[in-house]
Amino acid sequence: MGFQVVRQKDSHVIFLNGRDTFPVPKHGLNDILIGVERQLLKIL
């Protein structure tokens, strides 16, 4: 089972895979920061 978008609050999208919840900043066309990318890869 993959991650699903459960809600969006301001400029952050909240993902859930049944076990982990992970907020990801959403700022238009800007790339995500390397720290956020590393945290996401740890969960996956």
Image (spheres, rainbow, N blue to C red):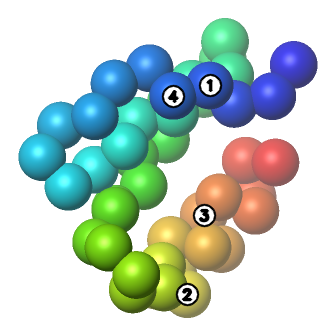
The residue under label 3 is which amino acid type? Gln
Report helix, strand or loop for mark 3: helix
Q: How many marks?
A: 4
Disc 3 crowd rating (10 Å Cα; few below 14, some 14-19, many 20+) is few
Instruction: Please indicate whether residue 11 sits to the left or right of residue 22 in the image.
Output: left
Depth-wise, is mark 4 or mark 2 nearer the camera? 4
Q: Which residue is mark 4?
A: 5
Give the mark toward the camera: 3 or 1: 1
- Across and down, in percent, residue 37 comes to 61, 73
Decide which of tag 4 and tag 2 comes sooner along the chain: 4
Per the image, the residue denoted by label 3 is 39
Mark 1 and mark 4 residues within 8 Å of each other at the beta carbon:
yes
Report which quarter residue 6 is drawn in: top left
The amino acid type found where label 2 is placed reads Ile
Amino acid found under the numbered disc labelled 1 = Gln
Q: Earlier in the sequence, mark 3 or mark 1?
A: 1
Residue 8: x %, y % from top left: 28, 34
Report the Cα–Cα distance between label 3 and label 4.
17 Å
Return the residue nearer the eye: 22 or 31: 31
| Rendered residue at 34%/62% (across/down) | 26
Vertical placement of residue 1 versus 35, above or below? above
